[in-house]
Image (cartoon, helix red, strand yellow):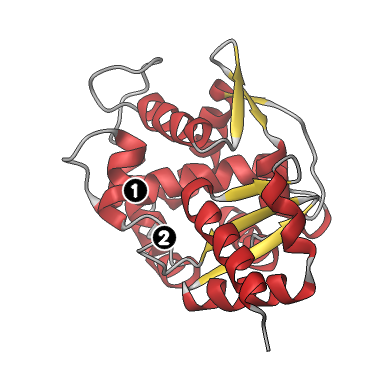
Amino acid sequence: MFSTDEIKKASEIFYYLLEHKELSSKEELYQHCRIPNVREILDILGTSANSRIVLIDNVLYLIPNLDNEFLGYKRAELKREIFNRSDMKNIDLYLAIYIMIVIILEFYSGESIKYKVRDSISIGEIDERVYQRLNPFRNPQNQEINDLTNLKIVEISNLYFTLTNVDGMAPVRTRRWYINCVVRFLHKEGLISLKDDSIIIPTIKFDRLIKYTLDLERLSELEQLLKEEDN
């Protein structure tokens, strides 16, 4: 049985996580999450909310499951958050997600994608990497890769190569515009910092979430599959 005090402490932590998404050891409330019964209640609350509550390096995170449209972003909300406009289509979102995958793979492409291989990358280099990775899929005969990756990779490639490549946040949709929208979104989420508005540097939060919560096996399989298709 859980005591009333333990339930109260767990509830306070859970509502704090709902608002802030994370609780660090600097906060007074954090000390209670070390109590076994409080942590057990938190796990129950997290599961009931279709989420995971994960303790990583003295920071407690609330991580919604991928299909969680209450605590996570709904598709329409995510499009607005990334692009700051209401007229974007699903294929635009797929391209943005693909750019995120490329950014992750540029930092974590070591053995089994468990090790960080670099500390920074320029937005221009991300542009080059996206071009290199999507170029092989311009061939319509690669349609079967869509089923293997669940990424609509052929459609993403078709969209990407209809765009002009103009630097900066131009009012028209260019390749660099999509990348800058993704970078701005990741920065707003506290996952990256920017140096001179052009160099992407992962934050501690980014590294923790990649190492401890991302499906690295799936990401590794995806990278290998795309490399094989490239070859």
Q: Is residue 95 visible?
A: yes
Residue at which label 1 appears? 78
Q: CA distance from mark 1 to mark 2?
A: 12 Å
Of the pair 8 and 145, the residue shown nearer to us: 8
Is residue 33 or residue 168 the one in the foreground? 33
- Identify the residue under disc 2: 71
Residue at x 39% of width, y 53% of height:
139
As drawn, the residue found furthest toward the left would be: 87
- Rendered view: 62 above or below 108: below
Determine which quarter of the picture holds residue 194.
top right
Quadrant in which the N terminus appears: bottom right
Residue 106 is situated, as x and y percent measured from the top left of the image, at 67, 40
Q: Amino acid at mark 2?
A: Leu
164 up-or-down from 2: above or below? above
Disc 1 secondary structure class: helix
Is 207 or 57 nearer to us in this picture? 57
Which residue corresponds to the image point at 79% horizontal and 55% vertical from the top-left? 114
Count neighbours of disc 2 (C-alpha within 10 A) and say few if under 14, some if 14 to 19, many if 20 or more.
some
Q: Quadrant of residue 119?
A: top right
Point 61% across, 25% down: residue = 193
Q: Earlier in the sequence, mark 1 or mark 2?
A: 2
Q: Residue at x 67, y 51 (%)?
A: 29
Dot 2: element:
loop
Q: Is 138 left, or right, of 172 in this rendering?
A: right
Number of other residues with Cα within 10 Å of mark 1, as a class: few under 14, some 14 to 19, many 20 or more: some
